[in-house]
Amino acid sequence: MWARRSEVSVHEETFQAMRQSILDGAPDHARVLAQRALQLGIDPLESINTGYLPGMTAVGELYGAGRMFLPDLMASSEAMTTAMAVLEDELRRAGGERDVRATVVLGTTKGDIHEIGKRLVGTLLAANGFRVHDLGADVDSAAFVGKTRELGADIVGVSALLTTTMAGQKKVVEALGEAGLRPRVKVIVGGAPVTRQWAEQIGADGYAKDAMSAVALAKSLLPARVPA
Amino acid sequence: MRPRLELLDRKLVERVLGEAFQLLREPGVRVADAAADLLRPAGVQVENGVARIPEALARNALAHAPREFWLHTREGKPAVHYGGDDVCFDPGSSCLNILDADSRQPRPAMVADLVRMVQVVETLPPYSAQSTAMVCNDVPQEIGDFYRLFLVLWHSSKPVVTGSFSAAGLRPMLELLAADAGGQDALRSAPRAVFDVCPSPPLNWSEFAAENLVELARAGVPAEIVSMPLAGATAPVTLAGAVVQHAAECISGITIHQLASPGAPIVWGGAPAIFDMRSGTTPMGAIETVMLDLACAQVGKALGLPTHAYLVAGDGKLVDAQAGMESGISCVLGALAGINMISGAGMLDFLACHSIEKLVIDAEAIASAQRLLEGVEARGEALATAMFSQTGLAGDFLKLKETRALFRQEQHFPSSVIERGGPQSQGASDTFERARRRADELVSSYQRPGVRPEVERARRQIAERELARCGRTSLMGV
């Protein structure tokens, strides 16, 4: 006797395809699936939380296990943001909003033009459900403070590749303090010359040695807001 | 026969150059004002900070750039030849940390560390040049570039590979070198230092880099372009593609430089690396990084230009088997490629950390590579038969006068760092320990080169003036 396919299992196939589109790093497929899910009347939040985000989590695990590489991660992240754009448009039209993990403001310190690591962090944070605003490179502390206040950001990430520009990270911590935004706003730092000791010394809330650990760090700083 | 290694066939070199010239037109090169101001009057279209450099102009610049030049000792003797297939080595530069010999952990580098390293390099013949090896954490940041050059000049008479950290930083450094040489003209005619100048990948001559290029050209002080495409991150992932980008960055730099002062000395150099797709790091000891260095240098050599590369560095955090393997391999390959200046010895941890002990060990790899370059010589009319005619099948070659006359030319004798048994054997010590002892011996044998009092006075005055700008009064490390 044939069991009637329940609505849940029909959706499960879609969710599975969504997860796979992220694992495959296939933005076009991820977008088509998101559009189809909307036509099927699936709640956009459910598509995100049951379909795409678990795909991204699996990508992170595979990367950690040495079975996926940075170009794979970039492709998966692009697929993720492509799908999210479709679903978030719909959420906004419906007057709702995704429960973002947190809003993160990112930038490289004044006098420093290095962006590779910071962009990677931004991409992975966005793909993991954070709302990311990237200020770019050569950013002074006033710009960090201004954007943090404007967006009501939860986390500020400050990157520096040079020893000479590392001091800028300290300036950002101080400027956020002077603006009265600390300790509510967490500051995380990274970059080749940066160490855990330096982060502690300048009063930052955390240090991550690479982009994947930056995502873990950002999540750990906001325990109450991480969806179950 | 001098052994040689090339990775590209002639056709591929031509393709690299062909595409490099294409890149100079499309997408062009991002240039700061200092460069744009020279390019525009030469007929280059510069829009929104992007210059489109025609091949004819670039080729003209390449034709003007000198095929060779020398760096000199403090006494004015030619010591480092940039040109042809000559190969020289200098320590890596600009790291922040030094590996502490006691704890074998990295710690911030200080003035005393740089002074010790300069003394060790001064006494090690495999290093033809010094480098401003570390950023000293006890020196005010604003004059970090100047002060490390001051220390190297103070404690050494060898040529120096250096560089400034800002556009403003270059001037007092040139002033110091002029004082050291005995004036601007002497500095121009017998330069002691070469300055690394780094474009930002991809294809970007920032304000700082462009101003340095122009100012060095006008001062007649050699510039060394250190183009550093990161294959897969800031450059095409293929080695050949990254070599094209390197060529385009070098050619655009040479064009700007030669427009500022035709005939000024400049080096086709670089520190390219692959971008490790697992870790996101830029491994200097990876074989593909070494291949990039060799291929980039080969393109420069095909244009007849002096060359430079960044090799002999390891990526681990310890002076261990990985460090020995990575440094030894790249040292030998770089030498076989005939790269004029090979920087990087002594460095660990993706160029973040220096080790004096590793520098001492690397000197052994360099000496071996230098022996390799001498090749296998046919000495005497007969290769073996004349010796056999004396000893026959008794095989007693140790007694032969030819043995005694020729063994020193045939065999290189490493220092006590390399365990070969015999009377110098240090038993079951490890390489690091032997290198550490050797560094102590070298520092004990070091003697500061003599300097005329007026030169010393002039150096001191400039250094005191620079320190005073940062609120410091006393000289460190002298």
Image: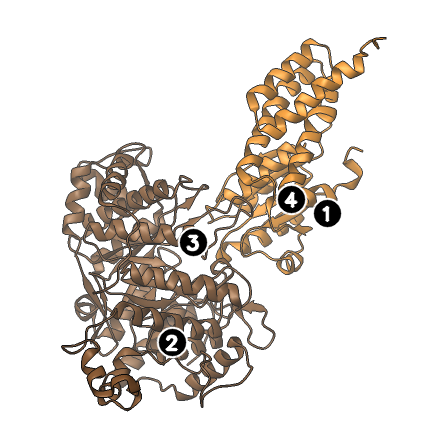
Chain colours: A orange, B brown
Q: Earlier in the sequence, mark 4 or mark 1?
A: 4
How crowded is the residue under tag 3: few (<14 C-alpha within 10 Å), some, or many (20+)? some
Chain bearing tag 1 is A
Q: CA gap, disc 3 to disc 4?
A: 24 Å
Q: Do the residues at discs 2 and 3 belong to one chain?
A: yes
- Residue B302 vs A134, above or below: the answer is below
Q: Secondary structure at mark 3?
A: helix
Q: Amino acid at mark 3?
A: Ile
Chain bearing tag 3 is B
Disc 4 + disc 1, Cβ < 8 Å: no
Q: Which of the 4 image quadrants contains residue A126?
A: top right
- Residue B9 vs A129, above or below: the answer is below
Chain bearing tag 4 is A
The numbered dot on residue B287 is 3
Q: Is residue B94 visible?
A: no
- Give the percent coordinates (x, y) of residue B178: 25, 70
- Give the percent coordinates (x, y) of residue A48: 70, 24
Q: Quadrant of the N terminus of chain A?
A: top right
Q: Secondary structure at mark 4?
A: helix
Single out the residue that lies furthest toward the front: B393
Tell which of A14 and B160 is nearer to you.
Answer: A14
Pointer 4: what residue? Answer: A64
Judged by depth in the image, the label closer to the viewer, 2 or 1, is 2
Pointer 2: what residue? Answer: B121
